[in-house]
């Protein structure tokens, strides 16, 4: 069964050993970089995405200090487990976790992705994320999910 677990001193090495496919490296920062960023992000959490007892993915999400809404900064599934529907299920787990912890004032979840990452775009759209027209962060397209 797919579930989330907090990244701790006991599982962080597994998290940084996860890898996307070679052709996806340009789309997502490494998990080591994400864990380093966590030191400077208030109200963020890093979670391992587990299939039963095995960590197969990673997510980093929390309240962005600029707009005070929830953002999914990182979402990845290890290359050995891609193409099995786990990414879509993992995003839903993150959405559910945010729903459980958010305050009433939080009405959306945002994320961004490289416009050339067609697969990510399709997965996010299937879940209900909608692109925010004309809103780019750096070169990345922003999409929003209404809670």
Image (tube, helix red, strand yellow):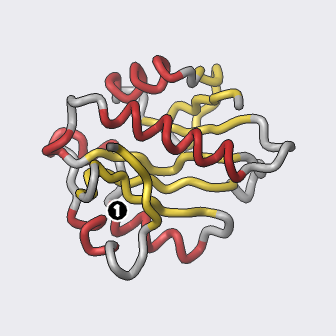
Where is the C terminus found, in terms of image quarters? top right
**Location of residue 132 by image quarter:** top right
Instruction: Say which residue appears at 43% left-offset and 53% top-offset.
Output: 4
Where is the N terminus found, in terms of image quarters? top left
Reading the image, the residue beneath label 1 is 31
**Location of residue 135 by image quarter:** top right
- Count the labels in the image: 1
47 over 131 or under it: above or below: below
In the drawing, does residue 17 fall left or right of residue 4?
A: left
Instruction: Say which residue appears at 40% left-offset and 49% top-offset.
Output: 3
Instruction: Say which residue appears at 26% left-offset and 51% top-offset.
Output: 56
Residue 127: image x %, image y %? 50, 23
In the drawing, does residue 16 fall left or right of residue 69?
A: left
Instruction: Say which residue appears at 22% left-offset and 30% top-offset.
Output: 84
Residue 74: image x %, image y %? 45, 50
Q: Residue furthest bottom?
A: 9
Residue 137: image x %, image y %? 58, 41
Local crowd at mark 1 within 10 Å, few (<14), some, or many (≥20)?
Answer: many
Pick whichever, 132 or 17, lies toward us: 17
**Location of residue 15 by image quarter:** bottom left
145 over 77 or under it: above or below: above
Q: Secondary structure at mark 1?
A: helix
26 over 66 or under it: above or below: above
Pick whichever, 19 or 93, lies toward us: 93
104 over 127 or under it: above or below: below
In the drawing, does residue 12 fall left or right of residue 8?
A: left
Residue 75: image x %, image y %? 41, 46
């Amino acid at each position: 069964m797919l579930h989330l677990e907090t990244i701790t001193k006991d599982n962080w090495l597994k998290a940084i050993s996860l890898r996307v496919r070679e052709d996806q490296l340009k789309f997502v920062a490494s998990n080591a970089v994400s864990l380093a960023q966590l030191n400077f992000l208030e109200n963020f959490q890093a979670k391992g995405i587990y299939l039963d007892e095995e960590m197969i993915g990673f997510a980093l999400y929390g309240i962005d200090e600029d707009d005070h809404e929830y953002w999914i900064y990182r979402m990845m599934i290890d290359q050995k487990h891609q193409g099995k529907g786990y990414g879509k299920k993992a995003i839903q787990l993150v959405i559910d976790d945010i729903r459980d912890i958010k305050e009433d004032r939080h009405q959306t979840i945002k994320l961004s992705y490289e416009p050339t990452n067609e697969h990510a775009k399709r997965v996010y759209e299937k879940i209900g994320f909608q692109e925010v027209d004309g809103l780019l962060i750096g070169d990345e397209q922003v999409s929003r999910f209404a809670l």
